Image: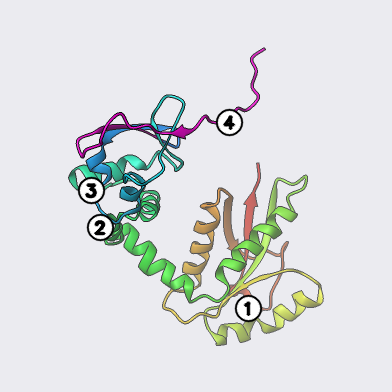
Amino acid sequence: MANLSPRPLSLRPAAPAGPPTASTVVELNVGGEFYTTTLGTLRKLPGSKLAEMFSLSAKIFTDANGRLFIDRPGTYFGPILDYLRCGQLPTQHLPEVYREAQFYEIKPLVKLLEDTPQMFGEQVARKQFLLRVPGYSENLELMVRLARAEAVAARCSRVLVCAVRTEEDAAHCAESLRVLEADKRLVVKFGPWKAAPVIKDLLDSVRMDIEARGYQVAYDYCSKKTFLPRLAACEYFYTFLFKWW
C-alpha cells in the first residue's frame, strides 16, 4: 500500500548561476501551476511587490525541481503575466485576477480592472451600497451560524430575515419583531439604509454573498410554517433556505 502520509515541501534559497539580466529566463511554480517567463517581465513595474520579489536583494526560494516558488494561487497568475508581457486585459475570472493584481501591486492593471463594467458594478455600485447597510457583514456571519446550528440531521435550515429600507418600514415591523422576541425566536434584521436600492436588491446581495462562500441558498416571503407577521409587515419578512444535501 502506498505511503500517503504528508511530506513538507522542500524549499531552499535559489542559487543564481550568474548575474541575472532582464532577458534571463526563469521557471516559476506559483501554487502548483508552472510558468516560464523572463526576469524583465517580472520586474516590468518597478515598485510593485512582484518586481520586489525578484530584485537582487530578495530572498527567493525554489521547489524540489529548481523552479522559483511563489506561495499564491497559481490559476490566476497567467493573466498577470499576459498583462505584463503585452498589456492584454483578462476577460474571465475578473474578481480573482483583481485580487491577485492587488496582492502583487500591479497598480495599472488594478485600475483597468476597476474600470471594467463587472468590477465597476461590484466595487463602486454594490459594495458601496452594502457599506451603507448597518451591520451587513455581521448579519451575514450570524445567518451562516444560525443555519449551521440547525443543520444537524437535517436536509435544510431556515433563517428568518427582516429587511427594512426606511424608518417607516421599520415602524410597520415593530410589533411583529416584539412577538418574535417574546417567543424567543431569532431573526436577522437588515436596515434601514440610506441608499437607492430596494429590499429585493438587498436580499439578492445577501444571497450572492452567501453563495460566494459555497452555500446553496434561496429566499422567499416568510411562510406560515416559519412565521406569520402582522398584515402590514408581510413584505418585510423572508425565509432564507440553506440546503445541505
Q: Nearer the viewer, mark 4 or mark 2?
A: 4
Q: Residues within 10 Å of mark 4 (few under 14, many from 20)?
A: few
Q: Please identify the dominant SS of the magenta region.
A: loop
Q: Nearer the viewer, mark 4 or mark 1?
A: 4
Q: Which residues are magenta?
A: 1-29
Residue assigned mark 2: 108
Q: Nearer the viewer, mark 1 or mark 3?
A: 3
Question: Which amino acid lies under the numbered mark 3 shown in the image of this protein?
Answer: Lys
Indicate yes or no whether the magenta region holds residue 6: yes
Residue 177's x, y, as percent?
71, 78
Check if mark 3's residue and mark 2's residue have beta carbons within 8 Å. no
In front of the other: 77 or 89: 77
Check if mark 1's residue and mark 3's residue have beta carbons within 8 Å. no
Q: Which comes sooner in the sequence, label 1 or label 2?
A: 2
Residue assigned mark 1: 233
Residue assigned mark 4: 8
- 3D distance between C-alphas at marks 3 and 2: 12 Å
Q: Which comes sooner in the sequence, label 3 or label 2?
A: 3
- 3D distance between C-alphas at marks 1 and 2: 49 Å
- 3D distance between C-alphas at marks 4 and 2: 37 Å
Q: Give the structural element (helix, strand or loop) at label 1.
A: helix
Quarter of the image that includes the N terminus: top right
- 3D distance between C-alphas at marks 3 and 4: 33 Å
Residue assigned mark 3: 44
Q: Nearer the viewer, mark 1 or mark 2?
A: 2
